[in-house]
Amino acid sequence: MNMPVDGLVGLGAAEDHLREVALFVALHLGRAPGVLWPECDHPLLGDGGDGAAGAERTDALAASPDVTVLAAQIAATTGLAARPAPAGTPPGHLLVHQFAGAATWTVAGPAGDGRDASLRYRLRAGEVLYVPDGWSRAAEPTAGACWTVVVLDPDAPETPATD
């Protein structure tokens, strides 16, 4: 898998965050779930914030093409096809970006030794959860919790979806 993390140009403040995400995906893809506590915030997501600023960002992200932009940037930095997740529980490798509040995620799937594993992660604003394809997932959000999901498809052409 080609991870072009050194070729990021023109992404401004998002570059460091996307570089972290690309390295995180390279480590976890197809192996096991994991949580990234990024050192650098993505300007579309920030660190969650509090009060009106966080609520405004949450509303703006939900009502704008920013999730598509995020997916395109992730595709460019990981070399994988990436797209915003449709409503519901989409199949595929998922990157959950928690951008406000907190949620406890339960993920379950096959462990490396062939037995089933069930794990719980507490995701706070600014953190990223990777869920491998084939693993079930469920969220228990707190009040004000908001996240966005990007689906990664390692088998698709290395271009982002545009729809």
Image: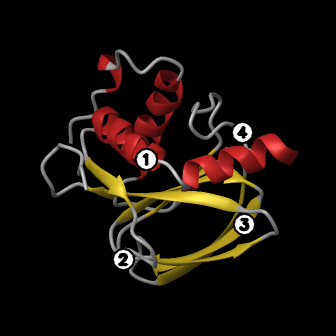
Residue 121 got which mark? none
Q: Amino acid at mark 1?
A: Pro
Q: Position of residue 108 (x, y in %)?
A: 52, 79
Query: Of the residues tagged 2 and 3, which is closer to the observer?
Result: 3
Q: Position of residue 3 (x, y in %)?
A: 28, 34
Q: Which residue is mark 1?
A: 65
In the image: residue 1, left or right of residue 141: left
> CA–CA distance between discs 1 and 4?
19 Å
Which of 97 and 78 lies nearest the eye of the viewer? 97
Sequence-first tag of 2 and 3: 3
Q: Amino acid at mark 2?
A: Gly
Q: Amino acid at mark 3?
A: Ala
Q: Secondary structure at mark 3?
A: strand
Q: Secondary structure at mark 2?
A: loop
Specify few, some or many for label 3: CA neighbours under 10 Å numbering under 14, 14-19, or 20 or more. many
> CA–CA distance between discs 1 and 2?
28 Å
Q: Position of residue 53 (x, y in %)?
A: 79, 40
Q: Secondary structure at mark 4?
A: loop
Residue at 47 percent across and 39 percent down: it is 21
Q: Which residue is mark 2?
A: 134
